[in-house]
Amino acid sequence: MKIAMASDHGGFALKASLMKHLDEEKIEYIDCGTYSEESCDYPDFAEKACKLVQQGEATYAILVCGTGIGMCIAANKMKGIRAALCGDTFSAHFTRAHNDANVMTLGARVVGPGLAEFIMDEFLKTPFEGGRHARRIAKIAAIEEAQ
């Protein structure tokens, strides 16, 4: 498993904390930026990380901005990306189990580092259940193709 990590300036500190946690867990990641707290535009970094997921170079992406909302909207504009904003472990679990989400977004101004680690861990360890949920994911893909 390899994770594409990205943030804007508002999520920079939380992204750094999450990468430290991934280091401790020995989970490989690619830091897609930003690399400072200087003001920047979140869509640029969402796109960079999600391209790695699209190309199979990363299994998942974790995106962080102030609320997580902007990153989530930007990510979901990309073909094949199913991004979910998570603020709790229950949502993180079920977005993987039922929605086969391949991107999770977090709001640095909404959740602290400790909770964010638990949320990310739950997202990364939860497998997709398949079954009836696979049929629904196929319908989402069909909507995407029709656009």
Image: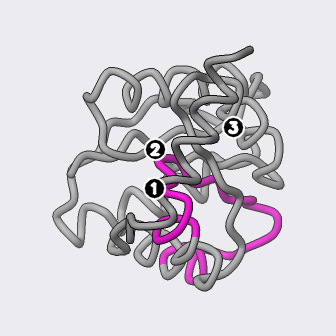
Looking at the image, tell me whether mark 3 or mark 1 is earlier in sequence order: 3
- Identify the residue position indicated by label 2 in the image: 61
> Which is closer to the viewer, label 2 or label 1?
1
Q: Are marks 2 and 1 in contact (CB under 8 Å)?
A: no
Q: Secondary structure at mark 1?
A: helix
Between 138 and 44, which is closer to the camera in this rendering? 138
Residue type at tag 2: Ala
- Identified at 82% across, 48% down, the residue is 69
Q: CA distance from mark 3 to mark 1?
A: 39 Å
How packed is label 3: few (under 14 Cα within 10 Å), some, or many (20 or more)?
Answer: few
Residue 31, percent from left and from top: 39, 36
- Identified at 56% across, 82% down, the residue is 114
Q: How many marks?
A: 3
> Which is closer to the viewer, label 3 or label 1?
1
- Identified at 40% across, 67% down, the residue is 131
Q: Which mark is residue 134?
A: 1
Looking at the image, tell me whether mark 2 or mark 1 is earlier in sequence order: 2
Q: Secondary structure at mark 2?
A: strand
Residue 125, percent from left and from top: 32, 74
Residue 57, percent from left and from top: 25, 28
Q: In the rendered structure, does residue 116 fall within the stretch colored magenta?
A: yes
- Identify the residue position indicated by label 3 in the image: 37
Residue 84 drawn above or below residue 91: above
Q: CA distance from mark 2 to mark 3?
A: 20 Å
Q: CA distance from mark 2 to mark 1?
A: 20 Å
Residue 28 drawn above or below residue 47: below
- Magenta residues, start to end: 95-117
Residue type at tag 1: Ala
Q: In the rendered structure, does residue 129 fall within the stretch colored magenta?
A: no
Residue type at tag 3: Glu
